[in-house]
Amino acid sequence: MALRITNVSMHRVALPLVHEFQTSSHRKSSIDHILVKLTSEDGSVGWGEIATGSDPFFAAESTGTAWSIGDRYLVPAIVGSSWTHPSETARLWNRVRGNYFARAGFDMAAWSLWAAAQGHSLSAALGGERTEVSAGVSLGIEPSIGSLLDQVAVQVDAGYERVKLKIAPGWDLEPARRVREAFPGIQLHVDANAIYGPDDIDTVAALDGLGLSMIEQPFGVRDFATHALLQSRIETPICLDESIETLDDVATMLALGAGRIINIKVSRLGGLTNALAVHDLALRNNVPVWCGGMHEFGIGRLANVAISSLPGFTMPSDVSASDKYYARDLIDPPVVARAGMVAVPTLPGLGSTVDEEFILASESQRLDAHV
Ligand code: MG
């Protein structure tokens, strides 16, 4: 049955973080995302989330550019469109290059609407098999090693089985070594967010031997060559994050041996349709994947939970509980973790109620379009 989109809205909402977060490039105390709501003629509703950074420091996009692309190209393309499967929406904006985060919000909304209209959970609509997914947490660069060790202890006590540390020049080998010493049994990995250059290869290689489950994106976004050189020298698997925006990037990684693990981010890949395609290609090549987060609010977080239920997601994902990041989430019930596991919702669509009243009360910018 074809679904015809009659109403589209975008809502820009900022929520304060319960704990400030520092990466190799910047510090954040609140998160500013755009929510996308689609309504079809039969009354079905879907929500998506554009989880850009406020600034173009992780990817080239920012909240402002995503708003502009949504306003000028994506909203006009989808309002009035008819389609029978969410993957067909890609053709609506096939002339728009890049802008993966903006496209992801609309693709995600189309998937959650389609799942709701079919009476299926988003997980089932995607082909998910797991009833619960293993959650890991990501810790930012802390003011001191003491406060980092305190943070790790809190998360290990909460039952998370994997802890990821953000690293940067001057905050790499020593914090990783100290956490490893204090917590010898946990799955530990580090993420550099592309901050190192080819001249730093020995610094990064020195992390080999700490029993890390992976070293994530040490080098530049387009620098497959240095990743391949490092991978040939060390035992620890390299995981690519920022480098993987398209299926072609996965092919490049495989051809060059530039990594052995992929961080699948729904936003960075332009939505669930492409995330699913990258998952399938990785599975065929025996490359394990996990789902990375962008500090999503509940809507994007539930999409991450749903895709993490697919069979190739064999490593813990960044799908930790809503309350690790936000005092109040936009969904009811929020995402909850028990002993490091998050249950995959079984209700139709996203699986939680979107708190539209809270969104309307919190939004700083809004756009409505209808046929
Ligand atoms: Mg990363």
Image: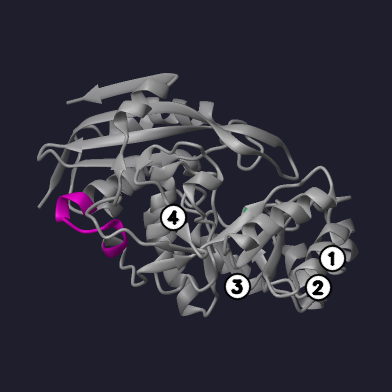
Q: Could you say whether the residue bearing mark 3 is in a helix, strand or loop?
A: helix
Identify the amino acid type marked 1: Arg
Q: Earlier in the sequence, mark 2 or mark 3?
A: 2
Residue shown at 72%/37% (left/top)? Answer: 26
At which x and y percent is residue 163? 65, 62
Q: Are marks 1 and 2 in contact (CB under 8 Å)?
A: yes
The residues tagged by marks 4 and 2 sit, at their Cα atoms, a distance apart of 29 Å
Residue 177 image label:
1
Q: Is mark 1 within 8 Å of ligand 1?
A: no
- Where disc 4 sits, the SS reads helix
Return the residue at label 3: 254
Name the spot of residue 72 as percent of width and height, x first. Answer: 39, 25
Magenta stretch, residue numbers: 115-124
Q: CA distance from mark 3 to mark 4?
A: 24 Å
In primary-sequence order, the first of circles 1 and 3 is 1
Q: Which mark is residue 42?
A: none
